[in-house]
Amino acid sequence: MNLHQDLYKHSLTLLTDLYQITMAQGFWKSGMAERKSVFNLFFRNPVFKGGYAISCGLHYAIDLLENFHFTQGDLEYLASLRNPDGTALFDRQFLFALGEMKFSCDVDAVPEGRVVFPHEPLLRIKGPIWQAQLLESFLLNAINFQTLIATKAARVCQAAKGDAVMEFGLRRAQGIDGALSASRAAYVGGCSATSNVLAGKLFGIPIRGTHAHSWVMSFMSEEEAFEAYATAMPGNAVFLVDTYNTLRGVEHAISVGKKLREKGYELAGIRLDSGDLAYLSTEARRMLDEEGFKETSIAASNDLDEHIIKSLKEQGACINIWGVGTRLVSASDQSSLGGVYKLTAIENAEGGWDYKIKLSEQTSKISIPGILQVRRFYDRQGFTSDLIFDEIDPPEFPCVMIDPSDFTKRKTIEKDIESENLLVPIFRDGKCVYRKPGLDESRRQAKEDLQKLHPAIKRFENPHTYPVGLEEKLFNRRSEMVLQMKKKN
């Protein structure tokens, strides 16, 4: 899917914060526009107080970058903007330069569906500083939200322990794109299907759905409503049974299910949407089994999330399809991933690199300077650790990795341990060199990565911290820069 052609139909280049464009003008006026720079996109803190995140949103970012240019309409709009004193906000020569600008950055990124952790760059941009700066807001918008939702979906699916999880959040999502992005990210994170028909069309996600309470309320009786639905949709006979009395509704579903069998069809399932789901599902299972409907599924909805599903599983609930909506697509217990986009290096007059660092009173907010890469190590049991290093000064093994927030936490990585670099080439000199995997492939990647994480890291309460550290030379450089910057400032 091309986001521009298939959904928005016009340029998204102005989907940015104003200060990105004012800074671009500043770089242009100061003669710095073409100076090479390096920016890294990463998040600082664990997601949902958990032990991992699932990368997502890269394909949206690629779509934007492949179409990154200022249209005549974009430039005319920018030309109309005014300063408080009434003068033009943007210089006409600058706007002309924007119109002539050709995207020429190198982009490396972690593919969608990979397990990732705080401080690791998910995306690295290298290129003219005015271009790299202009990309910040959209890239954060694309990566932050979809990574958040993919992670939430993975947690929900983990709680479901192999049961099908359907994403039902369209009506509660934050607008049109929020709904579509959430459906897409939830599928990467492990959901089996969505109720969002447009997401099914655009992304190829399986779609599922039955009927609402209004269908039952439209008829004189619940059984009449089920019979009418079975006649209209005999191959999709899943009945919502809690409009009036849930267990009586199950009885009516069974009655109609018997009539379906006489016509060569099966009662596919029932759905519970309120009440004591543990008790009602076990009673419904007993009733269905006693009448010979052992293959009929029991679906449940009603403000579910990973914690409620885990509790229902522990209570012995007989539910094998979970419809998760509001708390998934809105990530109700964490509003944002908190990803940031920081300058980490800039070209100097000699053609080399000057490393840049952002200081903070909080150690976790001090950025990591350099042209960064992440190497993941693993053995037969799965992933063992991730090492952040500078590509210009790569590690020599054995090497020491140091926790970026606690210098006392160190780990030696021996030579000849199997590993892979997580950041892969996406663009070179503005041209896409990456084969975008299909959504099913990204979904499989997420599942495979999660299987390689130790169970303690996937706990919902007090998860074990996966080892992520800076290569020793990079850690020492960062520490020296912190001391130098504090002396200067």
Image (cartoon, rainbow, N blue to C red):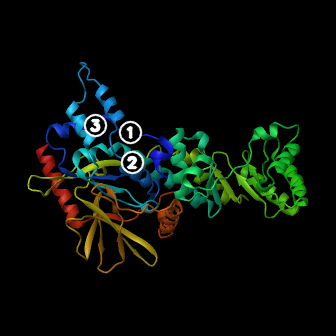
Whichever of callouts 2 and 1 sits on the residue coming sooner in the sequence is 1
Q: Which residue is mark 3?
A: 21
Does 190 appear above or below 65? below
Labels 2 and 1 touching (C-beta < 8 A): yes
Dot 3: few (<14), some (14–19), or many (≥20) neighbours within 10 Å?
Answer: many
**Which is closer to the viewer, label 3 or label 2?**
2
- Residue nearest the viewer, comparing 355 with 204: 204
Label 2 crowding class (10 Å Cα cut-off): few <14, some 14-19, many 20+? many
**Residue 196 seen from this side:** no
Query: Can you tell which mark lies on residue 64?
Result: 2
Amino acid type at image mark 3: Ile
Q: Inspect the image, locate mark 2, and give the three-letter code of the amino acid beneath it.
A: Leu
Badge number at residue 15:
1
- Report the Cα–Cα distance between label 3 and label 1: 11 Å
- Marks 3/2: CA distance? 17 Å
3 or 1: tag closer to the N-terminus: 1
Q: Residue furthest left?
A: 350
Horizontally, is 202 left or right of 262 in the view?
Answer: left
